[in-house]
Image (cartoon, helix red, strand yellow):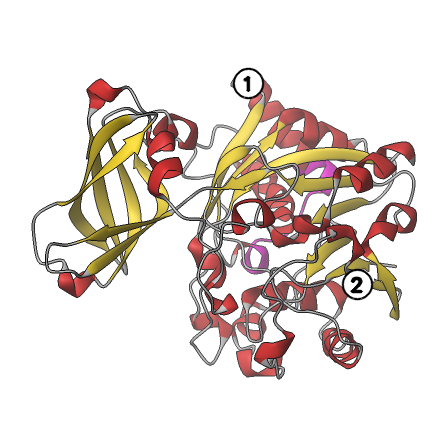
Amino acid sequence: MALIDDIRALRIADYDYPLPDERIAKHPLTQREQCKLLYYKGGEIEERKFWEVPALLPANATLIYNNTRVINARLRFRKETGSTIEIFCLEPVLPRDYEQIFQTTGHCVWQCLVGNSKRWKQGALTQTITIEGHEVTLAATRGEQRGNAWEIAFDWDEAAGCTFADVLDAIGEIPIPPYLNRGTEESDSTDYQTVYSHIDGSVAAPTAGLHFTDEVLAECDRRGITRREITLHVGAGTFQPVKSEHIGDHPMHYEFISVPRSVIQDIISAPGPVIAVGTTSVRTLESLYYIGQILEENPDADEEALTVTQWMPYTTPCEISTRKALQNIVDYLDRHHADTYMGSTQLMIAPGFEYRIVSGMITNFHQPQSTLLLLVAAFVGQDKWRGMYDYAMAHDFRFLSYGDAQLLMRR
C-alpha cells in the first residue's frame, strides 16, 4: 500500500492535457449506442463502438450501474429590481431523506448554491407558478451559510396538495454541466438521463450510462451478463475543480450511496468480474470494502461511524479479504432487519489506490486535472492514462459528458 504522504503529494498538474472546446461534445449522438468506444485491455487499445460492449464483456460478468435520476435542481427567481437569483438545490436538509423530501407538501429545506447572491440582501424570494391548473406561490428564504452553500427554506401553498417534486417539475431546470458552455435545452430533459434512471436525487448525471439503450441492455441479458443497480446521488462537487497544487490539499465531496443487500450478496458470489458503469458506481462499490472494514472492528457502528472518509484507503491497514468485508455488511443489515445499506462516502481514488471489487469499468473522457481522471489513472496505471487520452485525441473521440466512452478491463 502506498504511503499516505506519497498520495497526498501527487501534483494535479501531472494530470493535465490540452482539451480544445471543439472537442467537447455539446450534445449526444442521436443514436447513443453508436458512439465511439476506446477498448483498453491488458495495455492494448482498440477503437470499437459502444453497441459492442455486451460482446466485449465476459459472459459471466456482473454489470453494476447507478440508477439515480437527475432532478430539475436549478430554480430561477426574478426580483422586482429585475435581478435574477439562481438557486441550485444540492442535497436535502429537512427532511434529510431524498424520497421523503420530494413528497413533502408545503415546506422543506435544502442545502443550495446561490447565484448572484449579492443581489439577495434580505427577505424571501417569491414567484407564482402553475401546477396542474392551480396557481401556487413559492417562497425561498435564505438561512445559515455553510461554506459556499446556503440552507434555503422553500414554502408553498400546502392546501394545493402539490409536492416539492411537483414544484421542481413545474419551474426547475435540468442542471447540465457548466463546461458545456451553453444553456439548458428542452432535449436535455431526456438526453441527460440514463434509460434506467428512476431514483430521484442527482444534480448531475452518471454520464457513462448515457450510452446505454434498451437494445444494448437486452443484448447483455441475452449473453448471460448479470445486471444489478445501485444508487449514488451525484452532487455538484463532481464538477469541483482541484485548485490546490497537491491533491492532499483538495477536499473531496460527500455523496449519498445506497446498495441493496441482494447486490452485495451477488458480488460475494459473482462467478466472473464485476464491471462498474461510471465513476459513481466505482466509488460506491469500492467504498463497500472500507465499510466492511469498519464493521470488522466495530460491528455495532452507527451511521456516522460508517462514513468512508477521503483518506481511509491509504491510512487503514487492509487486513481482511474483500469477501469478509462484504459479508460484514450483509450481517450488519441482517442484524438491523434492513434490505439496503445506506450511507455516505468521501472516498478519493488516486494512483496508489488498490481496487478491491471493480475489475472493469465503463466511463467517459474526463476533464483535465480532475479527481475523475485520478480515478482512471489509479485503475489503468499512472503511466497508461495519458496514452489512452492521446489516442482518443488523435482519433477524433468526443470528450466529457455527452462524448464518447471507454471500456477499461484489468488483465
The magenta-colored residue range is 313-325
Q: Residue at x 46, y 32 (%)?
A: 301
Left or right: 119, with 130 as reference point:
left
Which residue, given by chain and number where applicable, does mark 1 sit on?
A: 335
The vertical placement of 140 against 314, above or below, is above
Distance CA(mark 1)–CA(mark 2): 46 Å
Left or right: 277, with 245 as reference point:
right
Name the kind of residue labelled 2 in the image: Lys
Farthest residue toward the left? 122
Farthest residue toward the top? 337
Assess whether residue 314 is covered by the magenta stretch: yes
Label 1 crowd bin: few (<14), some (14–19), many (20+), radius 10 Å: few
Residue 264: horizontal and vertical position, in percent?
Answer: 68, 32
Residue 128: horizontal and vertical position, in percent?
Answer: 21, 38
| Location of residue 397 by image quarter | bottom right
The vertical placement of 337 against 216, above or below, is above
Q: Residue at x 92, y 40 (%)?
A: 59
Assess whether residue 306 is covered by the magenta stretch: no
What is the secondary structure assignment of the residue under circle 1? helix
- Split into 4 quadrants, where in the image is the N terminus? bottom right
Which residue, given by chain and number where applicable, does mark 2 sit on?
A: 36
What is the secondary structure assignment of the residue under circle 2? strand
Name the kind of residue labelled 1 in the image: Arg
> Relative to the observer, which residue lies in front, 229 or 172?
172
Farthest residue toward the front? 133
**Residue 11 in sight:** no
Q: Which residue is drawn at 70% across and 48% down?
A: 277
